[in-house]
Image (tube, coloured by chain):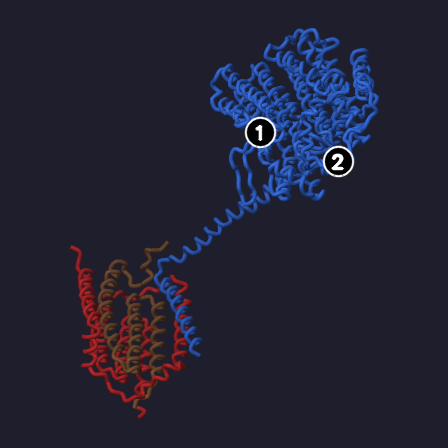
Chain colours: A blue, B red, C brown
Amino acid sequence: MPILDHLWIILALPLAGAAINGLFGKRWPQSAVNSVAVGSVTLAFLAVAELVREFSLLSPDQIPFVGNYFTWMVAGSFKVDFALQVDQLTVVMLLTVSFVGMLIHIYSTGYMAHEGGYYRFFSYLNLFMFFMLTLVMAANLIVMFVGWEGVGLCSYLLIGFWFLKKSAADAGKKAFIVTRVGDFGFTVGVLLVFATFGSIDFGTIFKAVAANPISEVTLTTICILLFTGAIGKSAQLPLYVWLPDAMEGPTPVSALIHAATMVTAGVYMVARMNPLFSRAPIAMLVVAIVGAVTAFYSATIGLVQTDIKKVLAYSTVSQLGYMFLACGVGSYAAGIFHLMTHAFFKGLLFLAAGSVIHAMGGEQDMMKMGGLAKKIPVTYWTMLIATLAIAGIPGFAGFFSKDEILEAAKSGPNANVILWLLGVAGAALTSFYMFRLVFLTFFGKPRYDEHKVHVHESPKNMTVPLAILALLSIFGGWFAAPKLVGGVDYFEKFLAPVFSMYAPPMAEPAVIIAQPEASAGMELLKALTGVPVIVAVLGLLVAWWLYIKSPETPKRWAQSVRGLYLLLLNKYYVDEIYAALIVRPLLWISTNLLWHGVDEGVIDGVVNGSARVARASGSQFRKLQSGNMRSYASWVLIGAVGFTVLLIALYVRVVH
Amino acid sequence: MILPFILFALCALLAVGGALALIFAREPIHSALALILVMVSLAVLYLLLGAPFVAAVQIIVYAGAVMVLFVFVIMLLNMGVEEHTNFSKIAKFAAWPLGLVLIVWSGYWLFHSRAASAIGTGAAMVPSSTRDLSKQLFQQYLFPFEATSILILIALLGALVMARKEE
Amino acid sequence: MSVIPVSWYLVLSAILFGLGVVAFVFKRNVITIFMSIELMLNAVNLAFVAFARALNQLDGLVFVFFVIVVAAAEAAVGLAIVIMLAQNRQSLSVERVNLLKF
């Protein structure tokens, strides 16, 4: 079992690629950098494929397969090994990350071809792959945290890739700092886990929580703390503000990190920690509420944005909300399923948007586009497919995953009508603004100067990944299709052991509520005419009417609800609120209290003051060396007489 | 009967008076003469204490040779009126208090120490004989004796070297 | 017989020593300072002799002997130095010997 015995190879390959490109790539031609970067990721993907084959040969009691490579830290009873594990969830994540990552690497060779710092980009991208794979394969919380922080670092580096542009550098900082807030909660959560279980190894924790009753308060606290890390990393309310700004980075970065992989780390973490979450219903409710509210809230902002990438960014935040909603109502498999399909269609959306931007020579404002469908057909068709997927139109990948989530919210074990309503409303809005994006970009009359901008289709190394992802956006969801015709959701079945191995005993006797036996056909019809589909089609129709049939209407509507329109356009002024409430006071404190007060006053004061005291006392003591013998003699005699007096006194005391 | 007391009181007064004269004299030659007075009165006190040899040595060597040397040097270096510099502040203020503290404190406790007063000079006073003293000196203290003679030799050489004129 | 207690001699010795200390610090003339050293040595000699009598031992007297001898040697060398000093600084004030100041 070559790969299973040496799991670290999967990590080492992209790391080596990053190191080689980083150290030597500066003077290499682009083709050399390409081969190293794309090659390492491709090899990693092949290793993952081989891993899957070997994994399929394992027997159920060998899963999860853990490879312990070395003891990393030992401090008293705190022991951390560098251990990697493989189970079904890992396999799903590995396949998604490595395959989509590979496609995006290939795409980047085309997109970044005319950019400076080419080698640096690919070095960072490979480094990101290394950290993401570490996160996914980690067998304990600390190794996962290494990956967690590492992807945050790479996100910072890549968002601020064009670091000479102030907005990009600021966006990188914002991303890192905002996620830091979440990471702090995560760290406290990890510490609490160690304090409660005495270990941070997944196997140990899960066995312990299944065997012994742990106080629900402790578990809830742990889960909520860990979830705050997810709120930061996966851009949920209130820590989502960094993701729209992160669009300052190159589009492949947005595709890979902020759509397909890094932001899904939070969802993965929640799914991985399901034994703990399942035993803390309040925490799960928090997760579900945050997810559902974020899904709806972010969709409202996406309605009126004009930058193509910003729309997609808010859409990502919204879809992540759906994933958390799924986990929060107990359907972890649905959440992971949506994670996977989302990687396909959102990755595709970003890459296609990048293709559009590339074709438009750098223009990102949709209001300045239009009528591009005939000119860049491959981009158009792939983007259309992705939009159909995200809207949840039946037949495409997003339909299956979103439908499962909303089904779980409506009638699953922890169903909640309000959450379901929020989800449905969000789905409607999603469909609307995504089709709005497509219509504004590709339809209608060109709203740009056709003589200035020469629209051209992207090269093959960009369009082929688009095509592959489009295929996946269609067929990637069909694992779950059999369920609609009375069969079993293969995806859910595959992942079932992960979520049932340490699951708490169910209150109700059966997970699936007994339903009247309906024929396969009835099941399918019910699915096709369910509420999610209706609202998706509704959104499509409204968008069509507003942007194709009568294009003047949006402006009229915006004027009539001007206040609301401005509120949405300015993203509810959240950034401004944060700046006033948090950033400015903090800056004031750091400048006045810490900088002037502590650093200059106390620390410099002590250092300079001690020097001043030394100098002053020195100059005083210097006067002793007057050269005057009488002074010397008197000082000596003062000492001698004093000593004599003391001795006599002691003698007298002793004797008498 | 009371002769020893009178003698003691006289010599003590002379000694202290000489010391005070040494301090308050304006000319160094007067201080030298005062010191000679102190030494002579101390010699008498030694006699009183039954150490005739030491008294003799005091007069011959100390008052007779060392002080003469001092007087020679004072007269040789006839520097005239001594300039009245007073650069040291501490010396001006510390001198008398220092001395007085020392005198009063040690004097008081010496006076009232039981050990000292217990050992009176009451026993039949037999003056120490020179023979016994020389026996001690050349038997028990032979090494210090020889070392001291070398010391004198060195001092002699040193004074010679320093007094030579540069050629 | 003479019954002057030893303590009296010791007190006298202390007085003489203290006056020698005062003279040492107080006077400016180098030779006078030297003489105050001799005064202090004499005071110590007196103490030695007194104790020799009190303890009926001869060791004190031997010590006095050595003190006198060493004092003589010291005076010889010291006065030679004083002469050179006086020739060098053209003054007998000890405060003129101040080249080793800060």
Left or right of A371 on screen, residue C8: left
Helix, strand or loop under label 2: loop
Type of residue at label 2?
A: Met
| Number of the label disc, if any, that sits on residue A328 | none
Helix, strand or loop under label 1: helix
Left or right of C77 on screen, residue C100: right
Quadrant housing the C terminus of chain A: bottom left
Numbered-mark total: 2
In the picture of the structure, the residue carrying the numbered disc 2 is A506
User: Would you identify the image quadrant in which residue B162 lies?
Assistant: bottom left
- The answer for which chain carries disc 2 is A
Where is residue A20 shown, x and y percent of the image?
Answer: 49, 23
Q: Nearer the viewer, residue B150 or B143?
A: B143
Q: Nearer the viewer, residue B35 or B74?
A: B35
- In the image, what residue occupies the spot 22% across and 78% down? B59
Q: CA distance from mark 2 to mark 1?
A: 33 Å
User: Would you identify the image quadrant in which residue A7 lies?
Assistant: top right
Where is residue A228 shown, x and y percent of the image?
Answer: 68, 35
In the picture of the structure, the residue carrying the numbered disc 1 is A134
Kindly tell me whether residue A555 is visible in this rendering: no
User: Would you identify the image quadrant in which residue C85 lies?
Assistant: bottom left
Sequence order check, earlier mark of 2 and 1: 1
Where is residue B68 shown, x and y percent of the image?
Answer: 21, 72
Q: Residues within 10 Å of mark 1 (few under 14, many from 20)?
A: many
Type of residue at label 1?
A: Thr
